[in-house]
Image (cartoon, rainbow, N blue to C red):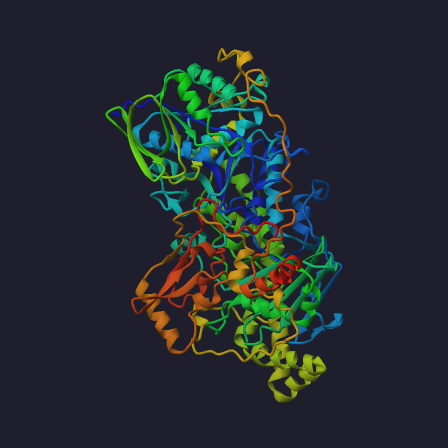
Amino acid sequence: MSDTDQIKYNLLLVGGSPSNLALAHKLVALAKESNQKLSIAILEKAREFGGHIVSGAISNPHVIKKLFPNYEELGFPIEGVCDESFFSVMGAHKKWDVPRPLMPDEFKKEGYFVLTLSYVVSWMANQLKEVIKDVPNVTIDFFPGFSAHEIIYDGNNKVIGVRVSHTERPDDDYVYADVTVFGDKGFLSQDLIQKFDLRQNPQMWSVGVKELWEVPGDYRNKVWHTMGYPLLDGTFGGGFVYGMKNNRLTIGLIISLDSPNPNINPQQQLQEYKKHPWIQEMIREGRLIKYGAALLPEGGYYSLPSKFAVNGAMLAGDALGVLNARRLAGVDMAMECGYQAALVLHEAFKEGNFSQEKLNQYQKNLQGTFVMKDLYESRYFRYAFMENPRLLGEYLPTVSKSIDTGSPFMGMLKVGLSHPLTAPFDGLRVKSLFDGKRDLGPLAYKPCREHIKPDFTPPALDEDTHYRKDTIYSRPDAVFYASTKYHEENHHIDEFEAATCMQCIDTYDAIGKSTPCVSDCTAEVHRVDEIEGARKHGMSLENCIQCRTCEIVCPEANLRVNPTEEGSGPDFLGL
Amino acid sequence: MSGITDIIVLIKQVPDTTSKAGLNPDGTIDRARAKRMLNPFDRYALQAALHVKKTYGGKVTALSMGPPPAVEILLEAIEHGADQGYLLSDRRLAASDTLATAYALHKCILYLGKFDLLFTGLQTTDGDTAQVGPQIAERLDLSQVTYCEGFSIQNGKLHARRIIEGGHQDVITELPALVTVANAYHTLEYKTIRGARLAQELLRDEALKNQYIHTITLDDVNADPELCGLKGSPTIVAHTDKVGQIGGQCTMHQGKSADILIKEIMDCTNIKEFAKQ
């Protein structure tokens, strides 16, 4: 190998994601059988694999078992196996566990794995290093601390690799490959999707904020999903509490960004959630260990790209957007993408054919799996809430309130009495939309930012005042628990036009509100600076935990969050 | 043309300062169990060497002395762009003090042959003597620039700036010269993907690794074992005192708002007692 040759591989995986690592595992297994020669590179922007991974996570273990039949023996990291799951509606003071017969099936998680996904990803990378030792015909180079910044095309618009750095030696900046698979969360794959106009409907994003606690009680294998308090302004979302081994508790909140509310402040909403007496009871004597946030692609079936592959490249996992919001399932969907992509890639490498036609066999194959079946069935789930703002804006708050004052059934009765004509109809329609039984044809979404109404004011939140103050964290304090670390001269968020930001600040100043970037940041990055009498947008980039919420909610699409360089960013390992 | 062809950088593997693992009960370092890292001061020496390579040309050789795991830091140097590494590894070197170490290393440098510049860090985080660099210069009869915070090469001469108390001093010297590099001037650059790829390739391919990383012994460099290791070290460690577990009585209050932190600190019993006094 010379010092100036091109850095080239057969396969380049962008992102140390569950999808890409599942792909690598399956492909190595196939190549071991067939003796196919392969060189693979995996880029991961975090300092170590798993360092930028945040997820709940509660996962159907079927794909894990398929990929690693002897997963227990191999030491696959599991926090617990759910033995009791609840779906609860929250008032500000009380919580109501929906009785089992009334509980939607998708909230029944018994037998599912409770996972710390960052550990899973770290394990999958390490396990790959072990497996590869017995497969001399395949080499894998792992590049933690290297991110992809630009997609490289040849003259015929075939993807031929990515740019990873910007040194004085171009030969050192590009990694080339026969096929590049994007398993990122849209950081870079959005460029590919835009270039080939693959996404007819924009992706709908939610932001998830999560804290990991060490608590005195043992809640292992218990799983709660909640609706209601503190999300009572019509915004789609919900909370989750998962009991894990070693007296740890995951507490999180997922909030959709197609909210009219310009000032969501997800991190503070999570603090509101934690003020609830039920959670207080659990964490009162506990200790916060870690904090983090990440986006979830929730558009589902109608946000999927029209093609899952182009010449020389494929999309997987969150880059594709296979998360199923209804089933709260993402990990198994992403892993199945990787599994199916590996089957197609193995053939493609045997034939030396990396055309879109060949690679997109992957899309057809996915059609035959639970991934596309589930997504199709749930295709109107999010839409059911969009088309009918009464569900979250009126019915849910009414029921939530009645939980505090006596009985949830009173609330339901109230809903029925106040909407005698619409409520029963709404109920039936929602049921049919959730199940995908009614066909409305394809949907058209607006980007999240277009849902924001600057003058929207959420109803005042009733809050329980008996919480322990030291269990509640301000946003700058929370950043401490994300352990961010950045290199000198880090500039990973682009602000395209300063004047656009100033105008936006003026608009929100005039109505006494914060701009969405300032309020919805999960980590105290965006701020307004007074400079010589002018109010300008400023950023404390050293706080950024790489969630990309600002990019999605910026009303003017004036921000872009790039992947961090040099292994910078938060440390989510263990979160 | 600068005429620079060969640059040597001396680097050392030290116990990871962030880890408490690897301490013997008597407080000395158990190097076999300790987590290891590249001496942080040496990163600046390596950066200076790579800067010369980029600016003036030449080949960078990283040289280290230590037990076999020290190969890890040579690979790290290769990730950052060093061209090759030499590890002087020999049981007879165990317990060398600075005199013995400088003797052994100067023999290595003679073994490597011609060079234009020799970089070292200011000191190490385990010994903290800052003696080895200057001793090597003396043994090799080289000009030495210590505490160097910036330099350029003009007409075959090294123009360097040294940190001195109350300011800095500009010096000019002929090459070859030894430079101990201060933690300033150069921004530490991140490893390159080419280097990271090569390092992984070397780990897979023993034959290729042997082309890039050479492990040598005292016999290879023609060093007298009597002058190395414990035998060659006049330094006597009379005894060591354990100063106690650092942080034993210390609680960190962090990551919370000021009012909560103040309350937590005021709740500490020793603070209360202190306040009473």
Residue A251 in percent (x, y) is at 63, 62
Q: Quadrant of residue A446?
A: bottom left
Q: Is residue A401 left or right of residue B165?
A: right
Residue B142 in percent (x, y) is at 36, 20
Give the vertical position of B12 relative to A154 (above or below).
above
Residue A335 in percent (x, y) is at 60, 50
| Residue at point 40%, 54% (across, down) | A196
Give the vertical position of A211 relative to B76 (above or below).
below
Q: Is residue A292 visible?
A: yes
| Residue at point 47%, 33% (across, down) | B197
Give the vertical position of B20 relative to B261 (above or below).
above
Q: Which residue is at the front of the view, A92 or A387?
A: A92
- Quadrant location of the N terminus of chain B? top left
Q: Residue furthest front?
A: B277
Residue A500 in percent (x, y) is at 33, 66
- Quadrant location of the C terminus of chain B? bottom right
Q: Is residue A325 left or right of residue B3?
A: right
Q: Quadrant of residue A83?
A: bottom right
Give the vertical position of B133 relative to A283 (above or below).
above
